[in-house]
Image (spheres, rainbow, N blue to C red):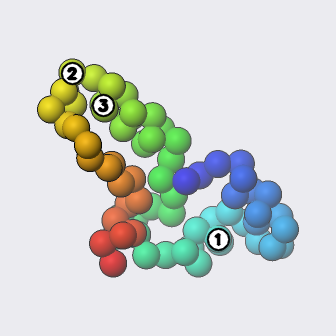
Amino acid sequence: MDTPLNDGLAALEGSTALEIAERSVGNLLKTPWVSVDDVVASVLFLASDDARFITGSGLVLDAGLLTR
């Protein structure tokens, strides 16, 4: 997930957050990070009436990383 924590990690490594993301490739989607907005949209969906029949399920937001 793209958070300021990545910037601190990158600074410790002497690289950039984007370089860290590129080293962590494996996502099926062409995106280096899942964004905070993606998580917010998912939470809003789960809290809405549109998700009223979803129970006891885990929602994986990883841009396809676990499918590899």
* Position of residue 46 measured from the top left corner of the image (x, y, whole percent): 31, 32
Left or right, 59 with respect to 10, comes to: left
* Position of residue 51 measured from the top left corner of the image (x, y, whole percent): 21, 31
- Give the residue at mark 1: 20
- Give the residue at mark 3: 45
Q: Could you give the CA–CA distance between mark 1 and mark 2, rounded to whole angstroms?
A: 38 Å
The numbered mark, 3 or 1, whose residue comes first in the sequence reads: 1
Name the residue at 68% across, 63% down. Answer: 17
Q: Quadrant of residue 20?
A: bottom right
Query: Looking at numbered disc 1 in the image, what kind of residue is underneath it?
Result: Ile
The numbered mark, 1 or 2, whose residue comes first in the sequence reads: 1
* Position of residue 56 measured from the top left corner of the image (x, y, whole percent): 26, 43
Query: Looking at numbered disc 3 in the image, what kind of residue is underneath it?
Result: Phe
- Give the residue at mark 2: 49
Query: Looking at numbered disc 2 in the image, what kind of residue is underneath it?
Result: Asp
Looking at the rendered structure, the secondary structure element under dot 2 is helix
Q: Could you give the CA–CA distance between mark 3 and mark 1, rounded to whole angstroms?
A: 30 Å
Quadrant location of the C terminus? Answer: bottom left
Number of numbered markers: 3
